[in-house]
Image: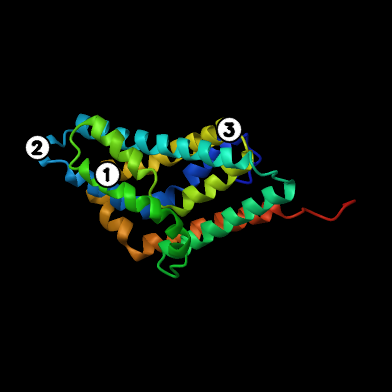
Amino acid sequence: MDPTGLGLPPLLAAFVFGLLGGAHCIGMCGGIMSALTFAVPPSMRSPARLSGLLLGYNLGRIASYTAAGALVASLGTLVALTPGARIGLQLLAAVMLILMALYIANWWKGLLKVEALGRHLWRHLEPVGKRLMPVVRIPQAIGLGAVWGWLPCGLVYSMLAWSLATADPWRGAALMAAFGLGTLPALLVTGFAARQLGTLIRHPATRTLAALAIIAFALWQVANLLPHGAPGH
């Protein structure tokens, strides 16, 4: 399955999906990256140390995505996914992207009801993350990133729908790892330029543009699921 609708090989498609989701990552997780950066004592914010910590956060986050992909794909092995069911999952993922865009722009908060399913798990993990702060060492950063990877997120849930459809734990894990790597550039840039981007991320115009981009991408996905032309044409 190709979450981009571009006819790319699966892992490349997952990576591109992560890249295209960068607008969401900046809008939803940019504040977290900024907060983690500012939590480091000023005397310890050297470029080398910050680079290591930011990479550590994201390594842990991607590791959790990978584990979630394997877990969800394992559940897929218990269900016979027909071609119709796979298309249904793609449509579901597109709908979730639109809900997420409405949430980012503060137009409608319906996604909170969907993400509430993940909040039960997050309620138990959040205290673990808090015990790791303030982060000043790379192992702490990796641990906190691993916890952060389970934060309720519509974009991640959308990608997990495709992982479920693979019905193969190894493929599901690989897809989520590739997706996580695709989200890396946006979050690294946000972490390195936290102070400069913080105000921009929170600006209503930024959130509106990000939402419109995500809606356009979701509609593009739906259009690629529709039959192109009548038989014989």
Tell me where residue 197 appears, x and y as whole percent.
Answer: 28, 51
Q: Which mark is residue 128?
A: 1
Give the Cα distance between marks 3 and 2: 43 Å
Which element is circle 1 on? helix
Q: Which secondary structure, mark 2?
A: helix
> Residue 66: percent from the left, percent from the top?
47, 35
Dots 1 and 3: beta carbons under 8 Å?
no
- Residue at image mark 3: 171
In the displayed image of the protein, which residue is found farthest to the bottom? 107
Q: Which sits earlier in the primary sequence, circle 1 or circle 3?
A: 1
Q: Is residue 193 visible?
A: no
> How far apart are the alpha carbons under marks 1 and 2?
26 Å
Q: In the rendered structure, which amino acid carries the disc numbered 2?
A: Ser
Relative to 39, 3 lies left or right: right
Q: Earlier in the sequence, mark 1 or mark 2?
A: 2
User: Are the two marked residues, 1 and 2, in contact with CB atoms closer than 8 angstroms?
Assistant: no
Mark number for residue 114? none
The residue positioned 17% from the left and 42% from the top of the image is: 134
Residue bearing mark 2: 43
The front one of 82 and 18 is 82
Label 3 sits on a secondary structure element that is helix
Q: What residue type is disc 1 on?
A: Val
Residue 112 in view here: yes
Q: As shown in the figure, which amino acid type bears the numbered disc 3?
A: Arg
Q: Residue at x 73, y 46 (%)?
A: 82
